[in-house]
């Protein structure tokens, strides 16, 4: 039994069909069936029940599937460790991050890290939080920088400082407003612009007060929310740390005490998953 056989078997289990697995692996279906048969003969067990038309993994097959994942993960981790040992602090550090993370905290961290470890190259993917978590699960990035809250069950994390939500608008929108706070009642009278990630929670807080907000714009990018508010289109509700992304603007920030959403950037990586030496050193920048 070798890693190739185990990877073939896992593909069959994941696809739930030998033909589909063969297509995924770019193999002939009879060849893959023969490999499965040889594996069963070697182990002395039936892994896939072929007595019915329905694809069914046996109890032995389920156990092998669990062990195969462990074996292949350990094999991959060992190979990476040997490369790290051979090369020293070199290689490629793959990161997934929000655009806001690059503009607020990551640029300085990456520059400082590069000065310390000039032999490490960077591969950076700018995606949404959900997309970054998926990239981590698929092993396409080692470290993600996302925004809380998120489902932390599968991840280790380092939380960066939390931020309150604020309302931002140009002077013209609130020209008669004095003070540094806005109530939900006041905001319900204005066209609002929100990041899609926070829309549901924000709307629910208005409803708890018996108010129905006018959501003029929902968007999944950061900077446009500020640019549209600067143009006088409406009031944007954003985390406080976003407000410095546009310099020399006429935007004014207002606290909104009734919006109880604390959010912040979080550095995440998969639990029980091997990290390269480069990734481990990069995490030290945030501790």
Image (spheres, grey):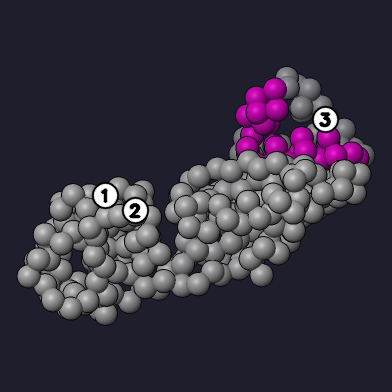
Q: Badges 3 and 2: C-beta atoms under 8 Å apart?
A: no
Residue 7 colored magenta? yes
Mark 2 crowd level (few <14, some 14–19, many ≥20, 10 Å Cα) = few
Between 7 and 111, the one nearer to me in the picture: 111
What label sits on residue 227 in the rendered view? 1
x and y percentages locating residue 227 in the rendered image: 26, 49
Q: Badges 2 and 1: C-beta atoms under 8 Å apart?
A: yes
Q: Residue at x 76, y 27 (%)?
A: 32
Residue depth check, mark 1 versus mark 3: number of the one nearer the observer? 1
Mark 1 crowd level (few <14, some 14–19, many ≥20, 10 Å Cα) = some
The mark nearer the N terminus, 1 or 3, is: 3
Disc 3 secondary structure class: helix
The mark nearer the N terminus, 2 or 1, is: 1
Image check: 287 left or right of 173?
Answer: right
What label sits on residue 35 in the rendered view? 3
Judging by the rendered image, the residue that carries numbered circle 2 is 246
The overriding secondary structure of the stretch rendered in magenta is helix
Q: Which residues are magenta?
A: 1-26
């Amino acid at each position: 039994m070798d890693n190739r056989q185990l990877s073939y078997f896992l593909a069959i289990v994941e696809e739930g069909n030998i033909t589909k697995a063969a297509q995924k692996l770019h193999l002939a279906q009879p060849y893959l069936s023969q490999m499965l048969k040889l594996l069963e003969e070697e182990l002395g067990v039936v892994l896939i029940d072929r007595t019915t038309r329905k694809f069914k993994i046996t109890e032995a097959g389920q156990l092998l599937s669990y062990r195969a994942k462990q074996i292949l993960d350990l094999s991959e981790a060992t190979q990476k460790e040997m490369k790290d040992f051979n090369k020293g602090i070199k290689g490629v550090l793959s990161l997934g991050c929000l655009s806001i993370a690059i503009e607020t905290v990551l640029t300085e961290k990456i520059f400082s890290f590069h000065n310390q470890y000039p032999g490490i190259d960077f591969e950076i993917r700018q995606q949404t939080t959900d997309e970054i978590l998926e990239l981590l699960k698929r092993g396409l990035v080692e470290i993600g920088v996302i925004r809380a809250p998120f489902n932390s069950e599968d991840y280790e994390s380092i939380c960066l400082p939390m931020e309150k939500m604020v309302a931002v608008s140009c002077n013209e929108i609130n020209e008669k407003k004095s003070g540094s706070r806005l109530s939900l009642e006041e905001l319900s009278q204005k066209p609002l612009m929100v990041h899609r990630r926070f829309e549901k929670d924000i709307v629910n807080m208005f409803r708890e007060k018996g108010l129905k907000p006018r959501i003029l714009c929902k968007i999944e990018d950061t900077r446009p929310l500020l640019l549209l508010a600067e143009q006088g289109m409406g009031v944007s509700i954003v985390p406080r740390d976003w407000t410095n992304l546009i310099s020399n603007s006429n935007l004014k920030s207002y606290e909104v005490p009734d919006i109880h959403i604390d959010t912040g950037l979080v550095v995440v990586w998969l639990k029980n998953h091997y990290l390269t030496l480069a990734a481990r050193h990069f995490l030290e920048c945030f501790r």
